[in-house]
Amino acid sequence: MSKAASEGRPNTALAAADNDRYNAELTELDELDGADARTSTPIVVALIPARNEAERIFGAVCATLHIPGVTRAIVIDDNSEDDTARLAEDAGAKVIRLRNRLSGGANPDIPEDKPIINIAGGKGAALEYGAKFAEDADIILLLDGDLGVSAGEADVLLAPVLADEADMTIAKFPRPAGKAGFGLVKGLARWGIASMGGGWQADAPLSGQRCVRRECLDQIRPFVHGYGVEVALTVRALRKGMRLLEVPTTMTHAATGRDLAGFWHRGKQFVNVANALLKLRFE
């Protein structure tokens, strides 16, 4: 027996070997943990802004939650005066009720445990607030509340992102059967994206149906207020060098016609898109 052993002192060579084995085991565990993290199922959250969509919101939420891989759906009820919020909850969505400071709470039948959040209003503001409740998401789906059951087609937007073929996908709608607007808003949006997005030609510059990686969305937020939100997302993403992919769908939504309400809606769209493009010039 050695003198070190007989005196009860540790053998430094053995201690070093044990330490090396311990470190090797830790490294192996770390590598396994990293592999598990890479192969784990991503969290996919759908953000659905909606205003007065009682006729379509139930179907939109149900269809979204039936998409394989979707973890949950969050509906941001933007000052609705109908049963949009209740129907969205019945369909399984988490609902955030927003109320415009000017108009106040239009629907008083809201339980005390469902607080009203005062906010400026508008699609972009609703999305920005709703995004705070999806901080754990790896992938975000942006869907409109008027899609109805056609929201289920968002699976074709999700697939390329899951396959790492795109950082953001954008839904292309089929050509409408009847006449809608005169194409002024779409033309402005398409021109703005091309001129500020490196010449990228958008077929669906105003489409709000999108799927985007979380790390990419964080780089192109905040959402701009109003109807310029889609144009701003596209331009910022292109400026960051992200991979954008437009995907054909047969989605349907409540399209506006050539009536007073339709012209008013498209007039607001035009102003919002123009304002968004002007601000993007100085970003």
Image: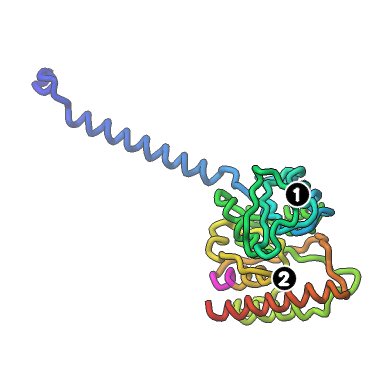
Which amino acid does the dot numbered 1 rest on?
Answer: Val
Query: Does 117 appear above or below 11?
Result: below
Q: Residue placed at 19% from the left, 31% from the top? A: 13
Residue 159 visible to an observer of this rendering: no
Q: On the image, which quarter does residue 91 sit in?
A: top right
The image position of residue 85, as x and y in percent, is 74, 50
Examine the structure image and report whether residue 238 is included in the region drawn in magenta. yes
Bounds of the magenta segment: 236-240
Between the residue at mark 2 and the residue at mark 1, the CA separation in whole angstroms equals 22 Å
The image position of residue 121, as x and y in percent, is 66, 64
Q: Which residue is mark 1?
A: 61
The image position of residue 188, as x and y in percent, is 71, 80
Secondary element at image label 2 = loop
Which amino acid does the dot numbered 2 rest on?
Answer: Leu
| Left or right position of 33 against 153 | left
Q: Which mark is residue 24?
A: none
Q: Residue placed at 32% from the left, 33% from the top? A: 22
Examine the structure image and report whether residue 195 is included in the region drawn in magenta. no
Q: Quadrant of the N terminus?
A: top left
Q: Residue placed at 57% from the left, 61% from the top? A: 217
Q: Main secondary structure of the magenta part?
A: helix
Q: Which residue is mark 2?
A: 206
